[in-house]
Image: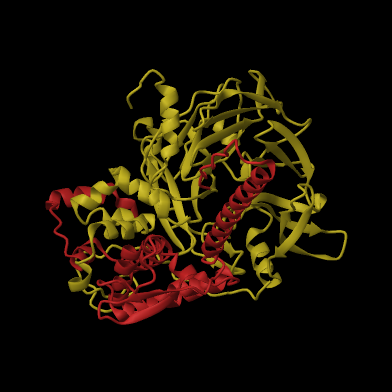
Chain colours: A red, B yellow
Amino acid sequence: MRYLALPLLSQNLTESTARAQTLSLYLQLSLQVSLSQRNESTMSSSSSSLPSCPKKVVTLKSSEGETFEIEEIAALQSKTLENMIDENCADTPIPLPNIKGKILAKVVEYCNKHAEVGVDAESLRAWDAEFVNVENTTVFDYILAANFLEIPTLLDLTCQSVADMIKGKTPAEIEKTFNIKSAFTPEEEEQVRRENQWAFE
Amino acid sequence: MEAFNASMPLPFSYLFTSGGTAASTSSLCGGPWMDPRIWSRLPQSLLDRVIAFLPPPAFFRARSVCKRWYGLLFSNTFLELCFQVSPDRHCFIFFKNKIHSSCIYQNNNSTNNPRSSSSASYNMEGYLFNPYEIAWHRLSFPLIPSGFSPCASSGGLLCWVSDEAGMKSLILCNPLVGSFTPLPPTLRPRLFPSVGLTITPSSIDVTVAGDDLISPYAVKNLSSESFHIDAGGFFSLWGTTSSLPRLCSLESGKMVSVEGKFYCMNCNPFSVLVYDIGSNNWCKIQAPMRRFLRYPSLVESKGRLLLVAAVEKSKLNVPKSLRIWALQDCGTNWEEMGRMPLELYIQFADIEGGRGFDCVGNGEFVVIVIRGCWDKALLFDMWGKRWQWIPPCPFVGGGCRSSDCGAGGSGEFELHGFAYEPRLATPVTGMLDQLAHPLQSFS
């Protein structure tokens, strides 16, 4: 509330005039107060309109320029998107130049599914298993997308599925898959294997 | 209960194939083919995350891939990552346990191990059982000295207790990493007490109960001592003592930890002893059908206490069975949760022949080991409601000694199991190191 400069009441004024001036001052003050109150209420109602409207939708743009819509609640599973929404950049489409349209569509599907209420854990687990039951090149893209968008559940799901793919492989096969140079001498490798012999039995 | 699944699953032990490339994509051991042109582009940090999701045997095999992967076990950032993301694995670890009566005669631990006569080459073995893949692995414990036996397990750690009568020494050990963390010795002399262990990310609780040596030759179940240490700075070095209920006999030696309490089977007549860690208080609760139980065992599953036992009501016309009860939230009443399918029980009773059996449970799994029978054991998946016979531990002498009935003779052993969660990182033992070296300000 702004402080009003109080008009100097001249001592020459008659009592009625003084009363009238006080009254008008009072009216002015109360008008100020009610105006500011109305401002506050409009401000609060506009800020409450954001969470009270769950259908608010965010637009994402893939590397090829294709756009995808996702409900804000679903998008909040991604810490990256959450930050962008907080900074109120969400009115314009959010560009994701390193995620292809095909992958982005699936990621949106994942987030939507996991934002649903009332899904029991068992069926969600089964849905997740189907989600990663794809070509491993796609799983690779999922991992990078989940990492960039910081979606912990999707990242863990995809990393677990890659771990399942490699857990049966021999060390030689793993080296080949990830193009890793061993740098162990044959003696060192033998020693390491003996150290961890129990895992090979 | 669902119909009994009679098929024997493949013993899925991980065989090491040297050299040969797995050209066929259908080979279960090799996993699906992965294109190196794609996967070599996976960033290091994400590859580390994938490694953190590997089950322990696969992780330890992967250490031979390169020096960097070898060193991950010693990297704090990697261990922290494991701590956060590694899923819970409900596994078991078994030991060949000498029968107590033979301990007094200083019998050898294992009849199969000719080296055990010399204490210098003594090497305790444990058998890790993974119920998800029906796989057995043999773990060794080179740092554990002779004269110690495993007694409890929690949070990825195994607790060992000294065999000798007197004040008991305890050691905490992470079987995968081979770490060795001793506890200060207990304050009262005991013979073969029962030990309970509860580990959380920020606390250690150990309780040693019973078998008080009131004189060098007299044993009585009188008291318990508890050890506590937590990250908040509170600790009790065995000073927390409590009296056991009158006339109890804790023969099993095992205490099961459920939601801040230790539970122990009490015999003659069967009841369950309960120790509340927070209030340092013992009480006794009745067992269900206590006069008709045979070989009851206590098991923890999903935050609840279960009792598994065979039931025989010879006087009434009630079919023999193996049943599972769950302790209700009130803490005194039991509700029957299920029983072994009758056809399976008939097979089971045929093999068991009155010799007895032991049960151990973890998460959704219960493993039932029949005494004297080493060629198979029973696995029950509570969530999938499946019972199945599982192949024996390949590292333990096989064959069903049907001729040995009744009491195990000298040199006989029992397979003694614990619920075990394999964890690469068990940082909570760091608190015990602080105890050992309180004046060291730089660790």
Name the residue rendered at 57%, 38% in the picture. Answer: A10
| Residue A71 located left or right of residue B247 | left
| Residue B232 located left or right of residue B301 | left
- Compared with B400, B427 (above or below) is above
| Residue B236 located left or right of residue B30 | right
Name the residue rendered at 55%, 62% in the picture. Answer: A42
Between B135 and A11, the residue placed more toward the observer is A11
> Which corner quadrant holds the N terminus of chain B?
bottom right
Pick out the residue farthest to the right.
Answer: B316
Q: Position of residue A133 (x, y in %)?
A: 39, 77
What is the number of callouts on the image? 0
Answer yes or no: is residue B152 visible. Answer: no
Between B64 and B146, the residue placed more toward the observer is B64
- Compared with B99, B402 (above or below) is below
| Residue A127 located left or right of residue B141 | right
Q: Position of residue B41 (x, y in %)?
A: 20, 67
Name the residue rendered at 26%, 79% in the picture. Answer: B24
For residue A142, what is the image quadrant? bottom left
For residue A129, what is the image quadrant? bottom left
Q: Position of residue B401 (x, y in %)?
A: 56, 56
> Which corner quadrant holds the C terminus of chain B?
top left
Between A192 and B149, the residue placed more toward the observer is A192
Between B270 and B332, the residue placed more toward the observer is B332
- Compared with B23, B346 (above or below) is above
Answer yes or no: is residue A83 visible. Answer: yes
Q: Position of residue A190 (x, y in %)?
A: 19, 51
Name the residue rendered at 29%, 67% in the picture. Answer: A144
